[in-house]
Image: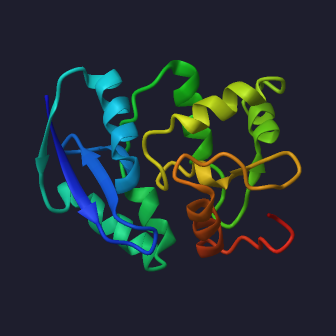
Amino acid sequence: MELFIDKINSPLGTILLVSDGENLCALDFVDYEHRMTQLLQVRYGHFHLKEMANPAEISSKIQAYLEGDYSSLNHIPVSAGGTAFQQQVWAALRTIPLGTTVTYGELAAKLGKPTAYRAVGMANSLNPVAIVVPCHRVIGAKANLTGYAGGLERKRWLLKHEGVALESRN
């Protein structure tokens, strides 16, 4: 299986994105490349990464988001794999409006599984396409910034970038 990888310099550090030529399959940060590779191996088994600038115009859309064109993320097709439950959680993440946050419990309730907040958190942590599937918009029950695979400083930056007021949060 051949997949295409590109690197984007950003205020968050170097972003890696992987495409199958049509869809975004993975997006992570260079310091989490090992995690990204492991998730790709679980999904695809053996694969080869070929460097390609702006595969399926995804890199330019990520760059546009970083420059303030927030709607550009809506135009990125995603193929994340995962279990049926993970896919349900990841689809729900894409419905969280820009500039807002929800708790793990609120997201679980939205899915009709109000006691499954831990399972929602686990699915959130395995999201292979950070930023585009905005797992950074999910916060702890007491409005604290918890659980972001790319690190809490990146989560804080993304939320501030999207206009979320964080004064009362850690």
Give x and y (percent) for residue 148. 60, 49
Foreground of the two, 118 or 108: 118
Residue depicted at 17% across the width and 46% down the height: 4
Residue depicted at 27% across the width and 46% down the height: 18
Does residue 129 sit above or below 9 in this rendering? above
Q: Quadrant of residue 11?
A: bottom left
Residue 7 relative to residue 74: left or right = left
Does residue 88 sit above or below 99 in this rendering? above
Residue depicted at 72% across the width and 70% down the height: 164
Give x and y (percent) for residue 94. 56, 48
Q: By what rule are the colours in the image chosen?
A: rainbow
Q: How many marks?
A: 0
Which quadrant would the N terminus be assigned to in this image? top left
Residue depicted at 63% across the width and 58% down the height: 152
Give x and y (percent) for residue 5. 20, 50
Which quadrant would the C terminus be assigned to in this image? bottom right
Q: Quadrant of residue 99?
A: bottom right
Residue 67 relative to residue 139: left or right = left
Furthest residue to the bottom?
Answer: 67
Give x and y (percent) for residue 44. 26, 24
Foreground of the two, 129 or 49: 49
Foreground of the two, 84 or 152: 152
